[in-house]
Every structure is written in C-alpha cells, then in structure tokens.
C-alpha cells in the first residue's frame, strides 16, 4: 500500500520558458561534471520559493484558501527582484538522505529577494494565512545523496517576470500552477 497523498502549497518566482531551459541545461552539465546521480528537474519545475503556505498537507487546499492567497498576492505591491545566481551548493548534512543541489544568489540578490517578499508578510496575515517565509533564496536543480560544498558558477542574471501560486504533489515530481501574476517593471 502506497503513502497517502501529501501536498506543499507555496508562492514562487518562476523563470520564463527560455530561462528555465537554459538553467536546466546547465544543471545537466553540472550533474555530469560532478558525477551526480539524481535526476535533474524538468525546466517547468524550476522555481524559487518565496513563501510556504502549507507543507505536507493531507489534502489540496480548499478554494477559499486559494482565493485568500490570490487576494494577498494581488493586494501586495510587488516589484521584480534582481537576482544574481553566482554559486551552487547542497543543503543538508552528510549521510544517505538525498540533499537538494541548488543555485544561490549573491548578497545583493538575497537582499532583493527579501525585499520582494517583505510586502507579503502583512497581507498574508490580513487574509488569515499563516505563512513560513522561504528563508535563503535558492533554486533547486536536483536531489542527490552527495553533499557538495559551495562553488562559484558563471553568474546567471535573473529578473523574474512571473510569480505563481503552486501546488506540489509530494513524491510525484509534479507541480501545478494554481494562479500566476506578471510582475510590474
């Protein structure tokens, strides 16, 4: 008998089609060069989580919760962050468990990411949602058992145009876009 379904519900910055294809191709090159065995995320699954609205939920969020999240994002004054992804690493401790292999921002990119997310804090509360901020700005490329130390990469300059409310079907490697917004310049 399989595991019962579980869902993660979150807000994410989404790369555009060409950007996600380019990043996925780089991930495949790094996977090969570093001898990683984990499967690279498909381009459409690449994202940067801004806020976790629900983790390991036993069922998908109800329409009212989705509507509240949409209202919060729509009412926030969001502006596009400038992100410079300039190093890669793994999160997690040594051991047999799989660790996310991620791209990370420089300090200015981290600050821009936090400034982007900041206006959402009050609006989440206003619509009655308890939200966990995402923490360190990162983009997961794959999961692997190897722990990699931080290494520099040729910078990827990213000025996201799209923000989306996402539902992850845990264990299925599948994300569903529930709503999306184009960010103003």
Image (cartoon, rainbow, N blue to C red):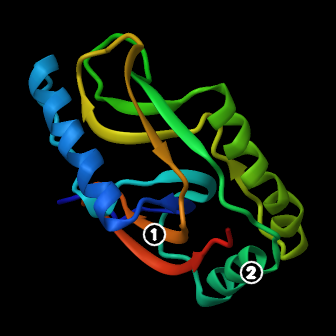
Secondary element at image label 1: strand
The vertical placement of 86 against 117, above or below, is above
| Mark nearer the viewer, 2 or 1 | 2
The answer to whether residue 12 is left or right of residue 67 is left
Image disc number at residue 74: 2
**Residue placed most toward the observer, 159 or 44:** 159
Residue 17 location, x and y as percent? Answer: 31, 66
**Are circles 2 and 1 on residues that touch, CB within 8 Å?**
no
**Residue placed most toward the observer, 131 or 18:** 18
For the point 73% across and 36% down, the residue is: 111
Which residue was labeled with disc 1? 167
| Quadrant, the N terminus | bottom left
Q: Residues within 10 Å of mark 1 (few under 14, many from 20)?
A: many
Residue 141 location, x and y as percent? Answer: 31, 40
- Please tell me in which quadrant of the rendered image residue 70 appears: bottom right
**CA distance for labels 2 and 1:** 18 Å
Which tag, 2 or 1, sits closer to the chain's start? 2
Q: Does the image show residue 173?
A: no
For the point 74% across and 80% down, the residue is: 74
| Quadrant, the C terminus | bottom right
The answer to whether residue 64 is left or right of residue 22 is right
The vertical placement of 159 against 78, above or below, is above
Secondary element at image label 2: helix
- Please tell me in which quadrant of the rendered image residue 101 appears: top left
For the point 48% across and 66% down, the residue is: 58
Q: Does the image show residue 8?
A: yes
The vertical placement of 61 against 185, above or below, is below
């Amino acid at each position: 008998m399989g595991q019962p379904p579980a869902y993660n519900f979150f807000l994410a910055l989404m790369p555009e089609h060409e950007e996600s294809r380019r990043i996925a191709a780089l991930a495949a090159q790094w996977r090969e060069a570093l001898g990683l065995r984990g499967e690279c995320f498909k381009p459409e699954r690449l994202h940067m989580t801004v806020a976790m609205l629900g983790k390991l939920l036993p069922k998908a969020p109800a329409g009212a919760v989705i509507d509240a999240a949409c209202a919060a994002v729509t009412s926030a004054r969001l502006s596009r962050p400038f992100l410079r992804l300039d190093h890669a690493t793994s999160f997690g401790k040594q051991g047999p468990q799989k660790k996310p292999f991620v791209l990370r921002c420089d300090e200015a990119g981290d600050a821009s990411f936090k400034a982007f997310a900041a206006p959402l804090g009050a609006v989440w509360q206003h619509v009655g949602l308890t939200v966990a901020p995402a923490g360190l700005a990162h983009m997961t490329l794959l999961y692997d058992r190897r722990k990699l130390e931080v290494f520099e990469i040729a910078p990827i300059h990213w000025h996201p145009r799209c923000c989306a409310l996402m539902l992850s079907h845990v264990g299925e490697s599948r994300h569903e876009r529930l709503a999306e917004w184009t960010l103003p310049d």
